[in-house]
Image (tube, grey):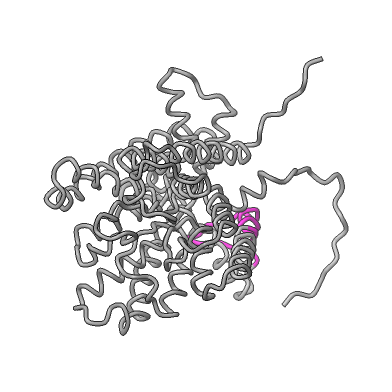
């Protein structure tokens, strides 16, 4: 008698696929030939680094340049690229190159991976994703080469340009600047407009999401023709970038920004408003942030990037839907919408569930870290939100985490990349209720 094997649900397939890549990456990073010292990195540290790279986070327990040689850096870059685009994107491209047709099952998993709305969108999105990524990362590498080649020479300058362009576009935050000072990120280029603006552009383009790319490509600057998703993403991104820049300046004008001229203050504020939206680079010492600057950065990390993008966070549209729901409730309106379009109730419920689950995980992770190690509250929350939103920014406590807390951060980075709600759905056994329970009202608020 033949066993009846049910195929994995798309969210479970994604979770398993990312886990497989992380474990393979960890084993490769353990190899002595991948490490600058010629000695094997411990499995826990390799697992932490592979998870951070595949989940495009950027948190590190060892400085990338100091720890890894060229082979190790190449392995990291491949993990970042696969993690940023989604492993299903890479697998499906390989299938197409080998002349294989995409089945319904593959399209369903791809749909989950890139947040496509229809199965018919999958092939079109795949072309946009691969072509657009190559164009944007290539352009970013060319722009960065004007800075790195004169400083580092042709071969090394080109490698640094490619590595940092891919890391920025994939919102990974890994850097190779440890040759100047370990864990220094882009602080050496704090006043460099070319490096700052190129990195910001790459981060924003990667964080918009592939669905927005397609809309802009097909409709140009005709905003009215964009889908509601694209309208909300572009509007919210503009508000978050401009508002985040102004608020960072307000919080840090007498602290980190003190002594800078107005142009330098604007550049630093812009970078630190964009980078927390899951990029992970920093041009200033985040350990010296004021409480206001730290809180603002945590909020930006919580919001994150767009669905179907290279970034993480609870997602921009999730927060927008929650705010629109609040606005409608305050105004006494039964329907929630924007731009003359009404939102589906399932999306409202999913947004509320996503925010609730995200905050539950963040508070649980923060408690575990604080219960076992005496970190300041802001530093612990900063680390937790950075991991769960796959950002990679840190006040410097990552290297001080105990093995238990490193495991906690690994789990949070993994859940953040898969999507906390998708992760829970992947683990839960869902079955439709046979009958509906009777309704009974409770008191709320």
At x 63%, y 70%, the residue is: 371
- As drawn, the residue found furthest toward the left would be 150
**Which quadrant would the C terminus be assigned to in this image?**
bottom right
Asked if residue 317 can be seen in this view, the reply is: no
Q: Residue at x 44, y 80 (%)?
A: 291
Query: What segment carries the magenta color?
Result: 334-353
Q: Is residue 443 above or below residue 430?
A: below
Residue 281 picture location, percent across and down: 35, 59
Name the residue nearer the viewer: 428 or 147. Answer: 147
Spot the residue most to the top: 1
| Quadrant of residue 444 within the rendered picture | bottom right
Task: Please indicate whether residue 64 sits to the left or right of residue 426 in the image.
Answer: left
**Quadrant in the picture for residue 288:** bottom left
332 displayed left or right of 133: right
Count the marks. Answer: 0
19 or 434: nearer the viewer: 19
* Residue 247 shows in the view: yes
Residue 149 within the segment the image draws in magenta = no
Q: Quadrant of the N terminus?
A: top right
Q: Position of residue 236 (x, y in %)?
A: 43, 63
Percent of width and height locating residue 428: 72, 46
Residue at the spot x=52%, y=36% of the render?
Answer: 110
Q: Is residue 232 above or below residue 217?
A: below
- Residue 351 belongs to magenta span: yes
Please provide percent x and percent y for residue 250.
35, 81
Left/right of residue 94 with respect to residue 363 in the rendered view:
left
């Amino acid at each position: 008698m033949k066993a009846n094997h049910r195929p994995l649900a798309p969210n479970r397939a994604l979770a398993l696929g990312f886990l497989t890549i992380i474990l393979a990456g960890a084993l490769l990073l353990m190899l002595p030939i991948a490490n600058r010292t010629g000695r094997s990195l411990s499995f826990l540290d390799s697992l932490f680094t592979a998870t951070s790279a595949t989940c495009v986070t950027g948190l590190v327990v060892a400085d990338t340049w100091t720890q890894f040689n060229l082979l190790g850096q190449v392995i990291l870059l491949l993990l970042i690229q696969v993690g940023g685009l989604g492993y299903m994107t890479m697998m499906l491209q390989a299938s197409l190159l080998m002349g294989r047709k995409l089945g319904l099952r593959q399209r369903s998993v791809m749909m989950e991976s890139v947040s496509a709305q229809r199965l018919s969108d999958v092939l079109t999105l795949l072309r946009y994703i691969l072509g657009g990524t190559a164009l944007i990362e290539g352009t970013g590498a060319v722009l960065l080469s004007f800075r790195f080649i004169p400083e580092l020479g042709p071969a090394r300058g080109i490698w640094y340009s490619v590595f940092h362009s891919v890391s920025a576009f994939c919102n990974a935050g890994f850097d190779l600047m440890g040759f100047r000072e370990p864990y220094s990120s882009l602080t050496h280029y704090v006043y460099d407009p070319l490096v700052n603006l190129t990195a910001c552009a790459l981060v924003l383009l990667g964080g918009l999401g592939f669905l927005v790319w397609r809309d802009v490509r097909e409709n140009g600057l005709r905003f009215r023709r964009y889908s509601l998703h694209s309208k909300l993403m572009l509007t919210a991104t503009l508000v978050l970038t401009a508002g985040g820049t102004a608020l960072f300046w307000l919080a840090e004008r007498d602290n980190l920004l003190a002594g800078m001229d107005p142009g330098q203050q604007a550049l630093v504020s812009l970078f630190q408003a964009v980078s927390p939206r899951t990029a992970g680079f920093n041009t200033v010492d985040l350990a010296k942030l004021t409480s206001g600057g730290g809180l603002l950065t945590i909020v930006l990390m919580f919001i994150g990037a767009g669905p179907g993008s290279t970034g993480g966070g609870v997602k921009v549209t999730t927060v927008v839907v929650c705010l629109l729901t609040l606005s409608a409730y305050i105004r006494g309106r039964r329907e929630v919408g924007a731009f003359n379009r009404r939102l589906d109730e399932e999306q409202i419920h999913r947004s509320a569930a996503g925010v609730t689950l995200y905050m539950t995980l963040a508070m649980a992770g923060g408690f575990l870290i604080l219960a076992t190690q005496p970190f300041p509250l802001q530093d612990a929350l900063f680390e937790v939100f950075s991991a769960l939103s796959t950002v990679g920014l840190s006040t410097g406590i990552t290297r001080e985490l105990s093995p238990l807390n490193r495991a906690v951060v690994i789990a949070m980075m993994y859940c953040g990349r898969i999507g906390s709600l998708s992760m829970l759905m992947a683990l839960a056994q869902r079955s439709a209720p046979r009958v509906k329970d009777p309704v009974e009202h409770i008191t709320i608020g």
